[in-house]
Amino acid sequence: MKLNYALMDPTGNMTVLVESPVEIEDQPRCAAALLASEPAAEQVGFISPGVGGADTALRMAGGEFCGNAAMSAAALHCLRRGIRGPATLRLRVSGAPECVTVAVAPGAQGGFACTADMPRCAAPEEVSLALDGRTYRLPLLRFDGIAHLMLPGDFDRAAAEAAAPQWCALLGVEALGLMLLDAPAGRMTPLVYVRGGDTLYWERSCASGSAAAGAYLAWRSGEKTEVNLAQPGGILRVSALPEGEITLRGNVRLHHVGELCLE
């Protein structure tokens, strides 16, 4: 099996997008091989033709939702078709109940500036979760394909790594993000665990986690919130309403293309 792929850079959250057709049951094995061959990559998605009015379709290796990968898929679609001017695309994305709309425009360094209308998340709920004999009461925000917990920015990283798989199982979600959020400073460090692929990464940026943080801050303030969240890979810009509508802005560029042959 030969896999043709593009390594995309959406605000540092390096994402492999496979353009070769791959059956769903083969995707976890292919994703593991690609992550091993591309050490900078943090996640893998699989591109397929759009149906039902969508321009293209994206399925993440673990079946989760990923906003950065969705913006990357929109940028790659434009690159493959020679579209440099502004365009608005509709994408079928795993974990999203409806098409995700992404507006794409020329960006810096030959890349693209992307604006995504993110799926709505449910109103924040407070959950109690235990780790090493201690109980934490934390805000939880659920999307259909992933859930995110808001943790203090100074939360211990080793404890977060131990907690993520346990809490993901306890909450019964496909994927769980632990967002170490310092709201006054506008900084966030994302840790994401995906149960389907058993992967745990300190991501350089997390789009759905940023959307969840924006939604949480809007809900807490009771008014529209606009925030620039500085993450290890750069800044993601979020606009959120207390009712759950979220818009995300970020930059995407093509890092390189490659191919991998598997037995």
Image (cartoon, rainbow, N blue to C red):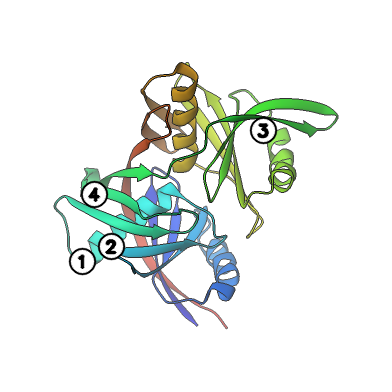
Looking at the image, is mark 3 or mark 2 nearer the viewer? 2
Other-residue count near label 2 (Cα within 10 Å), few / some / many at <14 / 14–19 / ≥20: some
- Say what secondary structure mark 1 lies in: loop
The tag on residue 81 is 1
Q: What residue type is labelled 4?
A: Val
Query: For mark 3, what is the residue?
Result: 157
Q: Percent x, y for residue 74?
A: 31, 56
Q: Percent x, y for residue 200?
A: 63, 49
Q: Residue placed farthest to the right in the image? A: 133
Q: Which of marks 3 and 2 is nearer the N terminus?
A: 2
Name the residue located 36 percent from the left edge and 23 percent from the top edge: 224
Query: For mark 2, what is the residue?
Result: 77
- Say what secondary structure mark 4 lies in: strand
Q: Do the residues labelled 1 and 3 touch (CB within 8 Å)?
A: no
Give the spatial CA distance, label 1 vs label 4.
13 Å
Give the spatial CA distance, label 4 vs label 3.
35 Å
Query: For mark 4, what is the residue?
Result: 104
Q: What residue type is labelled 3?
A: Arg
Q: Which of marks 1 and 4 is nearer the N terminus?
A: 1
Give the spatial CA distance, label 1 vs label 2.
6 Å
Q: In this view, does 213 lie to the left or right of 33?
A: left
Q: Which amino acid does label 2 sit on?
A: His
